[in-house]
Image (cartoon, grey):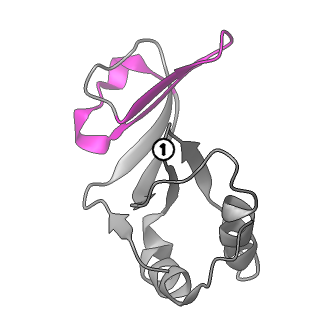
Amino acid sequence: MENLKIWKENYAVMNSKRIYEDAFANIDDGKELTVIIEQNKINEKDIIEIEKDWRLITFDVKLDFNLVGFIFQISSALAEVNISIFVISSYSTDHIMVKKKDLDKIIKILKNLKINAK
C-alpha cells in the first residue's frame, strides 16, 4: 500500500475536561470528551484518563463512502501479529493510531498490503 502519511509527532488519546482547539480531533459523544492531541500540548489538569505514545498514520487517498472492507483488511493484517489500532475516520479518508513501539513493524506490513476493498 502506498500513500501513507506517517506523522512525526507523538500523540495521546485523552478523556479530557475540555476541548483543545489545536488538537487533531475532539470527539464529544455526550458521555465523554475524547481528545487526540500531540503529547507536548497537553495540560495535565485537563486529564481524566490518558493513553500516551501513539503515532498517527493517514491513508493519504480519498476514500469513497461506498468503499467496503478497507479498515477490515488493515485491522485484520495487524491483528494477525497482535497489534491493536485506534481508528479515526474523517470525511474523505481514514487514519489509524498505533503504538510508537510498533511503528516500524506496522509500516512494513502496510506497505506490503494489497488492499482489495469493493
- The answer to whether residue 115 is above or below residue 60 is below
- Start-end of magenta stretch: 24-48
Query: Is 116 left, or right, of 104 in this rendering?
Result: right
- The answer to whether residue 22 is above or below residue 59 is above
Query: Is 22 left, or right, of 116 in this rendering?
Result: left
Which residue is at the front of the view, 60 or 62? Answer: 62
Residue 71, image x, y percentages: 67, 60
Residue 109, image x, y percentages: 55, 85
Residue 110, image x, y percentages: 53, 80
Name the residue rendered at 29%, 24% in the picture.
43
Q: Please name the residue that numbered disc 1 is placed on.
A: 92
- The answer to whether residue 2 is above or below residue 93 is below
Which residue is at the front of the view, 113 or 86? Answer: 113
Question: Which SS class for mark 1?
Answer: loop
Amino acid type assigned to the residue bearing label 1 in the image? Ser
Structural crowding at the residue carrying mark 1, measured as other residues with C-alpha within 10 Å and reported as few (<14), some (14–19) or many (≥20)? few
Q: Is residue 13 magenta?
A: no
Which residue is at the front of the view, 68 or 106? Answer: 68
Quadrant (top left/top right/bottom left/bottom right) for the C terminus? bottom right
Q: In which image quadrant can residue 30 be found? A: top right
Name the residue rendered at 76%, 72% in the picture.
76
Q: How many marks?
A: 1
Query: Is 72 left, or right, of 114 in this rendering?
Result: right
